[in-house]
Image: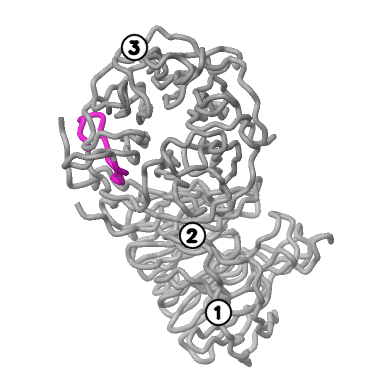
Amino acid sequence: MSAPRPRHALAVVLAMLACARVTEPTVSDSTAPTTSRSTAPAINPEPLPRELEGDVALMPQALTSFGAARHGAHVYVYGGYFGRPHQYSREGQSGRLLRLELATGTWEHLGDGPELQSVAMVSHAGALYRVGGMQAVNAAEQPADLRSHAGFARFDPSALRWTELPAMPDPRSSHDAIVVGGSLYVVGGWTLAGDPHATTWQDGGLRYDLDRAEAEWQPIPVPFRRRAVAAAAVGGVLAVVGGIGPDGEVSQSLELFDPATDTWTRGPDFPGAGFGVAAVGMGDVLYAGGSDGVIHRFRKGDAAWQRETSMALPRFFHRFVATDKDELAVLGGIRSMASGTRVRVVERLAVGNAPRPASVTHAELASPLPSKNRQGLLLLDDRLYLFGGNKSLGQHDFGPEHFTDEGQRLDLATLAWAPMAPYPARRQTMSTLVVADGTALAAGGFGHDGEVARTHPEIHVYDPFGERWAPRPGGLPGQGRSQFGLVEHDGTLWAFGGLDYDPRRPKDDQFRHERTVLRAATGDPAAELAPSGVELPQPRRAFAAAKLGDRYYLVGGMREGFALVDDCEAYDFGDGKWHGVPGPIRPRLSAELVALGDRLYLAGGSSRPAGGGDLASDRSLEELDPVTGEWSMLLEELPIDTRHMRMLPWRDRLLVVSTHDERPVAHVIVIDPGEPSASASARHDR
């Protein structure tokens, strides 16, 4: 089958943070309305350099509470906050106007205006409009002095000029704005006049006719007092979602204003997180999503919201922008106030398609890791830990110089690396697992002991908060194992299959394919993994494995004599029995199997070409429906060499990582499998 049209689940380009600023005269933010208008000099755009290859875009700066709007082939971003959450200062506010070209993923810096957060930006009839916002007057070490602004200005994207327009009657921030039928509507928000604890909540809205040459601000009644709302235009009406009120209660309300009758009606409550929510209208459909990551849709006239899709990176105080009728972009935002992690990754999500097709997003970024393959891998929330591994691209380079203990942490929200504690030994092919209580384990593996390269029995626990490794007293028996499956079920740690290798033993005993299944209590750190009484039906190492429900599925791998294993099996923890499983379309070695929802996904490793021959990288992605036993070819080809890729479940997506490249790069791929009913044309039933 042909590859699906790429749908960017994340989307395009890292720009450098430190760059010369092109300035424009600050637009006046007078609080008094005026019909006089002034035009600033034209701006010289400053292209921002690319630092990332692939389909993933990063904002030039991580921001919250900014304005964003699409105009033609570009998305524009104005202002925002990048400092420490809830410790506002002028050093942490942006006044930059940035422009993203959607087709190429290139960013430009279009100069600077007043430094504002909680600012709104809209697009209408060939121009962009910026309205309101909040400015921190104080320096970082001074008490907070926060002031809302009433400023209103128009930007001409063709002439690259700002023009000052009549200010709002009152300063306003933490509001939102949208254009409906040629009029700009401003709703929600409050007024800050210095003391952040003394606020005036706005209990009305504003309307400004953008199509009139000498328009004035007009008040409109609003049936709520809330800030941190999201406004959107849906089927000719103004929709306002969520927010928080003076009593501190977060709202899930949907309010709809009809300009034809000047009346408000109440829609069905938004089912997601309503504080700092983002929303966008596409025709008569409203999409909204908040910090829980779920994006819901409301079609004008419906009695309820429906779940549409989800963000790979949940966030709030972000923005949605419609890039075309079937796609929206998610920009900026913050994961949580506690972590302070702002999201630089721009996600581009398919919406409105039924069923939703599979999508692949690929980022290629510079890697500080010396290892090329067989690293240990842990995923803790949105942080990916890679450690140990082999520094050679060769298959059998096992000299002591080829092993490493170095590790790095990759933040998936920013795609930035940071050092992590080195692994306690120079190892490759460790089995790793994050158990239900959050404990991160790395067990066994293969490495040089100073005399020979062999398997090892140690188990280590990683503390991401203390950034250190500690030994788990109860390790693997004997010489240990590598290329085995490690899984937890109902408070018990299990080890399946694998290889015990020591070249110092007699030649016919060097390779011991372990069939004894081991287990230990997860909560007892001193418990050694000991025989469970369960045996594998056949030897198996370097296999793909995943647990779905009460069953642990083993697919492919290798047995004695370096022969591939074609049969697939599942161990049922409930009845304690092995069950046969239909084999995939392509039997594989060293593949990855991931359970996601009610399906299993197989990718990577090596397989033999249809006409026979040597093993080669298998770039396809297959999907198994365990109920029917049917395998589907979901994707024919992933965009990298997959022999040494790793794959993990990441919320409702598949995360693929590989450093198997001659260049010092890491490949990060996010796969949205789409709707199960869209899974594919090629069916395989055995």
**Residue 338 inside the magenta-drawn segment:** no
- Looking at this view, name the residue that lies furthest to the right: 142
Q: Circle 2 is placed at which residue position?
A: 346
Which residue is pictured at 21% across the width and 46% down the height?
680
* Among the 4 quarters of the image, the one containing residue 512: top left
* Whole-percent x, y for residue 363 in the image: 45, 56
| Neighbourhood count class around disc 1 (C-alpha, 10 Å): few under 14, some 14–19, many 20 upward | few
Return the disc, 1 or 3, that comes first in the chain's sequence.
Answer: 1
Which residue is pictured at 50% across the width and 76% down the height?
184
Q: Circle 3 is placed at which residue position?
A: 576
User: Disc 1, disc 2: CB below 8 Å?
Assistant: no
* Whole-percent x, y for residue 401 in the image: 57, 37
Give the distance between the C-alpha atoms of the residues marked 2 and 3, in whole angstroms: 46 Å
* Whole-percent x, y for residue 195 in the image: 79, 62
First to last magenta residue range:
616-631
The residue mark sitting in front, 1 or 2, is: 2
Question: Of residues 169 and 456, which is closer to you in this image?
Answer: 456
Q: Which mark is residue 218?
A: 1
Asked if one can make out residue 264 in the rendered structure from this viewpoint, the answer is no
